Amino acid sequence: MYRRCPLRPPAALLALLVAPTTACAQSGDPTGDPRFEQAVDLFEAWLDAKMDYEKIPGMSVGLIHDQDLVWAKGYGLAHREEGVAATPSTMYSVCSISKLFTSIGVMQQRDEGNLRLDDPVSSLLPWYDIEQAFGDGPTVSVEGILTHSSGLPRESAQPYWTGPEFPFPTRDEIIEGLADQETLYPADRYFQYSNLGMALAGQLVEQASGMDFDAYVRSRILDPLGMSDTYTDIPAEHRGDRFATGYTRLGRDGQRAEATFFQAHGIAPAAGFSSTVEDLAHFASWQFRLLENGGDEVLGVNTLREMHRVHWVDPDFETMWGLGFAVSRRDAGRTVGHGGSCPGFRSTLQLVPAKKMAGVVMINAQGTNPGDVYSKMMETVGSALETVQGDPGGGTPRPAALAGYEGLYESTWGETVILRWDDSLIALRVPTSDPMEAMTKLRRAGDDTFRRVRDDGELGEAYVFHREGGVVDRLSVHGNYSRRVR
């Protein structure tokens, strides 16, 4: 089992990297294996282009295996104007990942006998008075809220997603607005994602426990898990410091502006939390630990399994939801987790319980997909981790003599990244939607000459590197040149 390693301050800029902060390498740590290193290089070459072309200011990512944050890095800038690098300890708004913690609080109260999943919400919250527009249908239940099948409208009665002010309501304003709202669908008919429902879930926790929501989550979930850098709302005291500056979507002018600083107030149980890659790694590891060892650390193991299990399948058979957790089936098997989107931020936390693997992606910009980054990280770095775990010590060092060819080459027609791969090189056209499919393997055919390896193993066209003053500065393919720019 790998030891969790302390994260170093931001490293110097390296070729193809965007100011990363790197997890330490130790004896027995897979990050030092050449197969892992080259997978990271491939992922970062893909990510470098994505960030540049989409003008993403910064992000932090992490790969968790069981009890260890095996690999974590920050890319780009937490604060663009000040030039402050993003790191794995940078705080971001995690938006709707908040719902996982609120759901755990509800299930704790269920297990303590203070509420039932089939309880009508109206029987638990004395001020709940939203109009039931479908009187002959089922009532809005606790389970319906946790699975987003309650029929409640998506939002409370305030325009809090409207910028630039983003006027998030207080608890009292949410309650006052209920009288002017009505259910959107009959309960148990359709999936309708509802921030209103999850804000009410936070009130269920307060009502059942007799505690303030923030105090409850801190004492019953965050502190026991060692999540000292996670808050139920954005901590204003860390604004401009540890908490990253958020940026808007990419405008038609190709720019991102600084987003309005916000706090979610009464919507916090649904979308207000802030956290770090390192803290969410604790959260993922706790789940793997509980599932493996059993017991009742924070939550009973059978309750966590219940939350991970599908409780709702939409009529289109595309949307599946557990209790608080989104559930999907990918190539790696059943995946549970949640994504988030708030003014200035996108994030995702995904767990593959069968493999005890999880990934975290946090981005301080709107309009870019963290799920895409997660998928590419798992297809490259995550896959390499599995390979190294299955064959520890099986990798051989990549030839140091080939490092002089690595870099970014640019022509009128696009960009090509050259990387060392196994005992030779690969060429990768960027940007690309699939780095594994887009890479071309090369085989040395002479001094500064390599040839493409076809799918059938035969050799194709030549990739010829040219030098100026002994240093590679150009690449020619089919007689046409690309100049090395990094």
Image (tube, rainbow, N blue to C red):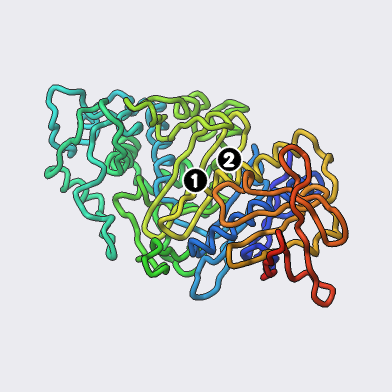
Mark 1 is surrounded, within 10 Å at the Cα level, by few (under 14), some (14 to 19) or many (20 or more) other residues, namely some
For the N terminus, the quadrant is: top right
The answer to which of 216 and 139 lies nearer the viewer is: 139
Dot 1: element: helix
Q: Is residue 231 visible to the viewer in this orientation of the structure?
A: no
Q: In which quarter of the image is residue 404?
A: bottom right
Q: What residue type is labelled 2?
A: Ala
Element under disc 2 = strand
* Residue drawn 13% across the image and 22% down it: 136
Left or right: 385, with 308 as reference point: right
User: How much space separates mark 2 and mark 1, taking CA atoms?
Assistant: 13 Å
Asked which quadrant contains residue 133, the reply is top left
What x and y, as percent, mark residue 187? 23, 27
The kind of residue tagged 1 is Gly
Q: Name the residue under label 1.
A: 371
Of the pair 243 and 33, the residue shown nearer to us:
33
Residue identified by numbered label 2: 358
